[in-house]
Amino acid sequence: MILKSHAKINLTLHIGRKAKGGLHQIESVMHPIDLYDNLMFEKMEGDEVVVHSNNTSILNKDNLAYKAAMMLKKKHGIRSGVRITIEKNIPLGAGLGGGSSNAAMALIALNSLWKLRLDQKKLMHAAFELGSDVPFFIPGKPALVEGVGEKVKPITSYPKINAVIINPGFQVSTKWAYDAFDKHRKRMPKKKAMSARAYAKLVQKKDINGMADNLHNDFTEVVAKRYKIVREMTGLLNKYGALNSCLSGSGPTVYGLFSSIYTAREAYFKLKDIYPFVYLTKTV
């Protein structure tokens, strides 16, 4: 079984207080994009879960696809083995949800491969045990995400928007970003941003200009303060024709939304030799 494991961008992200368990309350609209890892799942004789990848840094027991497989084996008494091959295209620690997406695809694939017959609600519950971003990837649609990531409300109507993604070639720790945000929360500029629920309505209406005008990420101030390149990248995306640009997740990846494939392609060619990872894509 081969599945595409899509990345996501946060079109808007509001961070609330810490909930019980140490996770933060959030309100976000997340959207899958046409950048994906390829995951292949093959039954194996024996009882092992084996992970192969073109990126050796994910070949350890912290890999979320591996954790997903081991969790299902333990919960459901599975005695079969599986080989998971991950062709990694999504940058690591980038704010694009690559690891979370891999975990969700592992749950979906192994639910089928091992004939577990778990419905979407049970898959979402299992996903949340693996990480707060993982449930979003189970339905595979843009969604309003609330709570600590467990409340996912898919958006049924949405536009496909051209985008350019830039990653500067280093990782940002999500834990560091949350800690820095909490530390500096009271000193943050009090910018009035559209609520995530109101933003979801813009997506539903396919209001591309409204969506671009209201991009927002609460992490931007703390991440851009430490990593000056974030401002540089968003500035260049806007200079080269983006309707607007924004940080995704806890960064350091930024993205720009474009009105057409032509302006997006033009920006891509101007930027592709400046940064380690520049990708021409679209929302899906």
Image: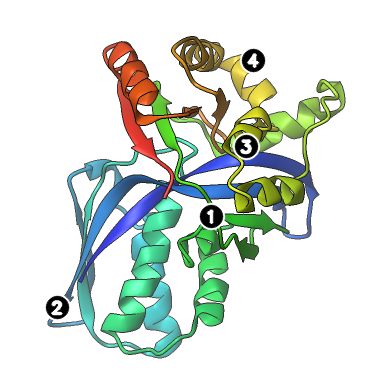
Amino acid beneath label 2: Met
The image quadrant that residue 71 belongs to is: bottom left
Instruction: Name the mark on residue 225.
Output: 4
Could you tell which of marks 2 and 3 lies nearer the N-terminus? 2
Q: Which mark is residue 211?
A: 3
Numbered tag placed on residue 47 in the rendering: none
Q: Secondary structure at mark 4?
A: helix
Q: Label 4, label 2: how many angstroms apart (C-alpha)?
A: 48 Å
Would you say 168 lies left or right of 38 here? right
Q: Which residue shows up at 67% across the image and 46% down it? A: 202
Tell me where residue 105 appears, x and y as whole percent. 36, 65
On screen, residue 198 above or below 247: below
> Residue 236: x and y, percent?
47, 11
Q: Position of residue 269 (x, y in %)?
A: 28, 16
For the point 45% across and 55% down, the residue is 100
Precedes in sequence: disc 4 or disc 2 = 2
Q: Mark 3, mark 1: which one is toward the viewer?
A: 3
Which residue is the site of mark 1? Answer: 142
Q: Given the image, on which type of amino acid does mark 3 rest?
A: Met
Q: Nearer the viewer, residue 63 or 42?
A: 42
- Dot 2 falls on a residue whose secondary structure is strand
Q: Which mark, by number, is residue 44? A: 2
Front of the two marks 1 and 2:
1
Q: Separation of disc 4 and disc 1 at Cα?
A: 29 Å
**Residue at image point 49% right, 76% down:** 123
Residue type at mark 1 is: Pro
Sooner in the amino-acid sequence: mark 1 or mark 2: 2
